[in-house]
Amino acid sequence: MATIITVHGTFAHFGGVQSDIPAPGAEAQWWQRGSASEADMMRLVDGADGPLHIEPFVWNGDNSEIERRRAGRALYRRMKALEQEGEPYCVIGHSHGGSVISSALLEAAQRKQPLSGLKRWVTVGTPFVNLRRERVLFLRLTLLQKAMFVASLMLLLMFAAFIVGEVASGNSQFDNQNWLARYGIYTLLMSLPFALFWAVFKFLDLRKLYFYRPHIVSEARNGFGPRWMGFWHKDDEAVSGLSTIGGLKMQIFHSTFAVPFFSILSVFLLPLLYLLLLTTPGAMVGIADVMRDRVYQISDYEQSEARVLAARQEVRQLRRSLRVSRQEFDNADTGGNLVQRLDAKKKVESLETSLQEAREKMHAENPNLVPVERALRFKRRFLERDGKRCEGGSLCGSGRDIALNSRLLFHLVTDEASSLFLDDDLWRGRLGTLARLILPVILVPIVFGVVAVILVFLVQGIARFLSGLLARVLDDLTWFEIKRSALGNDTETEVALTAAPRPFWLNQSPPSLPLELGEHITGYSNQIAAQSLGKFRNAIGELAFSDGKQNTQHNVFSYLTWRELIHSSYFEVPQFRWLVAESIATAEGFKRGAALEGAEPARKAAAWLEAMKGNG
């Protein structure tokens, strides 16, 4: 007795159930019981010492590297059972069914099982995925393992921080041999948890990714490579498409895609900066301290405070007296006698002279009157409360009083703007007061407008740089995920590179199918595609007015056979089935069936097989 195991590919169960028996009313697929492929194989191939048995191997068919490896382990167990029965057997895998077989053979190599009963393994249109493991052990760990790995470093990091602190404080004794020996021993002890975790994870990594070990690759290549037959069409959509995806790289994100977003942010940058300053205690205290020490130089003017306040108080008192005297003069001018008017006039003139002299005296005795008064005004507003200096002589509220913070920022742009553009010695009195009120209203928006324009251009320049950088990063991530999804790489420890018509552990790819046989498969696929196109044309109305998305999908897939693709058409072509039969019948433990002996298709199949072996 001899056995042939058939292994289906990805999505073989799409829309159905996982079974080697076709669903009621459905046509049997090549690997299922009752299919045309099974019938041909039973007719064309016999066991060398008994009947032929064909056994479908069913797996879930997901486009998942993890699932393919899980299926490979299950297939290995079935092959091991056949080994124990002492029967010759062959395995045929289509699409990623070939990847399942490859995984099973690597499992056998890792377990040092030669699988002597395996006489031939055949892959059909298999895009073997080439992966590489992450280069750094940390990246090959699971999320939980990464967390444990980092935790194992904490003791060593804490000890390293302690040593750095000792060195920075000058407490270290590098010239003391006892000190060096003691801390050397401590370093080794602190490293033990990290070393232990590293050794455990390294051991688990070697067990999990055993197929990257050179001796296992060599074992698989030498043991199973000579028994392999790989069939693939040069226009196979899966093989050719996935083999080129590794080098495919087109721009998805334009280098300026993020510039508009960042530019809009620049419009609101000034108010955002204002709110940031307003709510940042450290920044507000820093601004107040700079104004106190660098701008107003309060400490330099505090000794003049009493004199300036007394002089200013005398001027205010004379100004109030002058206002009262002018009112008396106005009353005497309208209803009083001449003597009263003259006395009132003399009093006004005397007060005016006294006020002028007091002002001149105040400026003469205090040549730095304006900066002193500005410093004292700042001190009263922001550094004192109820006549008492705030804690540390700094901003009252320590920057946490939002109302005071807002007054400080408002003072910053109004008082300073006025002081920069007005000469306080020239702009006194009502005119100076009016100018100081109007100037910030005009000047501050202009200054802020200029600053806003500068910020917009600055942000746009930064945005172009960041956008270009983001575009490159997002392009790389997008293509990485596209390749990862297309190649079915759902592992956490490996990176998908490309696909090839041979397993990564073999050195040479087989030649594509002979031209004549390839044309048979292409012609069949084109014929089915033309039929499907006609059905779609007739069904446009039904698809357009179908009720609900699920019903629409059912209608679409009811018109597709998937034989419209060359990748799915191999076993539908009789000539290809004869080639597969010939490749198995010529293996040890098998022989040609009566139908295969002497028939013209058999001679062609034998010639194609010899030609492929000669080109391999």
Image (spheres, rainbow, N blue to C red):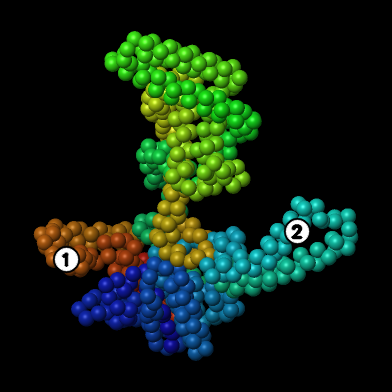
Residue 141, how many percent across, how many down?
A: 56, 67
Tell me, for residue 508, which label it has, or none.
none
- Left or right of 579 in this view: 301: right
Residue 212 found in image quarter:
bottom right
Can the viewer see residue 595 in this picture?
no
Residue 64 found in image quarter:
bottom left
Residue 166, how many percent across, how many down?
A: 77, 56
Residue position for label 2: 163
Of the pair 386 and 383, the residue shown nearer to us: 386
Residue 616, how many percent across, how many down?
A: 49, 61
Q: How far apart are marks 1 and 2 (CA)?
A: 69 Å
Residue position for label 1: 548
- Left or right of 263 in this view: 510: right
Q: Which residue is drawn at 42% across and 23% down?
A: 433
Q: Which residue is drawn at 85% across and 64% down?
A: 181
Looking at the image, tell me whether mark 1 or mark 2 is earlier in sequence order.
2
Q: Is mark 2 on a helix, strand or loop?
A: helix
> Neighbour class for label 2 at 10 Å: few (<14), some, many (≥20)?
some
- Left or right of 264 in this view: 303: right
Q: Which residue type carries mark 2? A: Ile
Q: Residue at x 89, y 60 (%)?
A: 177
Q: In this view, does 534 lie above or below 335?
A: below
Of the pair 356 and 45, the residue shown nearer to us: 356
- Left or right of 387 in this view: 152: right
Q: Residue at x 55, y 77 (%)?
A: 108
> Neighbour class for label 1 at 10 Å: few (<14), some, many (≥20)?
few
Q: Is residue 493 above or below residue 471?
A: below
Residue 523 found in image quarter:
bottom left
Q: Is mark 1 on a helix, strand or loop?
A: loop
Q: Quadrant of the N terminus?
A: bottom left
Q: Which residue type carries mark 1? A: Gly
